[in-house]
Amino acid sequence: MTDRIIPDAAALSGWRKSSYSSGDGGSCVEALDGYPSGVPIRDSKDPHGPALVFQCDVWDSFVEALKESCV
């Protein structure tokens, strides 16, 4: 993967918040589906800040581990 950081995440559209996110403005991450080289993740409080791009298999493993730890 060549690009692991997107300097201005607001340059991309289609960000989605976690389904567990509340509307109270607390800490939350947003993900972007369909990005060609992985899964970009950004801080919802800083939409013009950077986004980190994770390889799909790494992101999938992380999400599965979270699901298992929250049961």
Image (cartoon, helix red, strand yellow):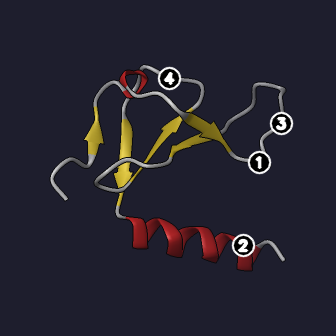
Return the residue at label 1: 19
Q: How far apart in space, not on screen, are marks 1 and 2 (Cα)? A: 13 Å
57 sits to left or right of 62: left
Q: Nearer the viewer, mark 1 or mark 2?
A: 1
Q: What residue do we see at 35% from left, 50% from top?
A: 53
Q: What residue do we see at 53% from left, 33% from top?
A: 14
Q: How far apart in space, not on screen, are marks 1 and 4 (Cα)? A: 18 Å
**Badge 4: few (under 14), some or many (20 or more) residues near its Cα, within 10 Å?**
some
Mark 3 and mark 1 in contact? Answer it, CB < 8 Å: no
Determine whether the residue tagged by mark 4 lies in a helix, strand or loop: loop
Identify residue type, mark 2: Lys
The spot of residue 70 in percent (x, y) is 79, 71
Identify residue type, mark 1: Ser
Return the residue at label 2: 67
The spot of residue 31 in percent (x, y) is 53, 45
Q: What residue do we see at 72% from left, 80% from top?
A: 68
Return the residue at label 3: 22
26 sits to left or right of 56: right
Labelled disc at residue 47: 4
Determine whether the residue tagged by mark 1 lies in a helix, strand or loop: loop
